[in-house]
Amino acid sequence: MSEEKSKRDALRSALLGKPKRISKIIEIAEGVEIEIRQPTVGSRSRIMNAAGVSASSQDLNDLAAIQIAAVVNCSFVPGTSERIFDAADRGVLEELPTNQWFDEVAGVALDLMNSEPEKAGKA
């Protein structure tokens, strides 16, 4: 194996091998905890697209859509890979009252989406 290939393999391993995904467990009601995970590159794209943000337009066209997409893509059963919500829940999520658990979960998800790794998860 050449030295260049070895360096390349080491770089790829460091960059692509099991990256640490930031998460935060929050209690949204007494005894009800959910895990909010930093979105992946793919889920971040889905979240941004839901709100009308694209490469050609950075305008946020729909606040509810970005919040719902963030909640759907970032909310997990703690300690598992199982998402709590899916796209079929959009209508139900749209009808939730404001200033309750939904706003908290959406805020945490959007914060994690925009976090710098060393700052995420800190109070």
Image (cartoon, helix red, strand yellow):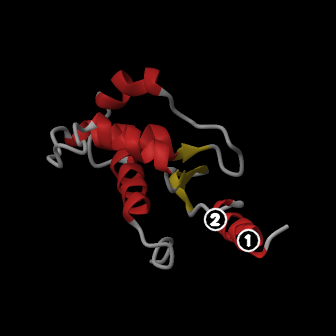
Query: Label for residue 115?
Result: none
Residue topped by disc 1:
10
Q: Is residue 110 left or right of residue 42?
A: left
Residue 97 placement: quadrant: top left
Where does the image place residue 50, in percent across and percent down from the top left?
Answer: 30, 35
Q: Determine the CA span between mark 2 and mark 1.
A: 17 Å
Along the line of sight, which residue is nearer the eye, 36 or 95? 36
User: In this picture, is 5 found above or below 38?
Assistant: below
Q: Amino acid at mark 2?
A: Lys
Q: Going 50% across and 28% down the picture, which residue do you hit?
A: 86
User: In this picture, is 35 found above or below 53?
Assistant: below
Q: Amino acid at mark 1?
A: Ala
Q: Is residue 18 left or right of residue 93?
A: right
Where does the image place residue 2, in percent across and percent down from the top left?
Answer: 80, 70
Pointer 1 local density, CA inside 10 Å: few below 14, some 14–19, many at least 20: few
**Residue ranking furthest to the right:** 1
Residue 3 placement: quadrant: bottom right
Residue topped by disc 2:
20
Looking at the image, do the residues carrying marks 2 and 1 touch, with CB atoms under 8 Å apart?
A: no
**Residue ranking furthest to the front:** 2
Along the line of sight, which residue is nearer the eye, 40 or 63? 40
Along the line of sight, which residue is nearer the eye, 98 or 9? 9
Q: Is residue 97 visible?
A: no
Q: Secondary structure at mark 2?
A: loop
Q: Going 71% across and 74% down the picture, which residue do you hit?
A: 7
- Give the foreground label among 2 and 1: 1
Give the position of the N terminus as an image quadrant.
bottom right
Q: Name which of mark 2 and mark 1 comes first in the sequence.
A: 1
Q: Is residue 45 left or right of residue 12?
A: left
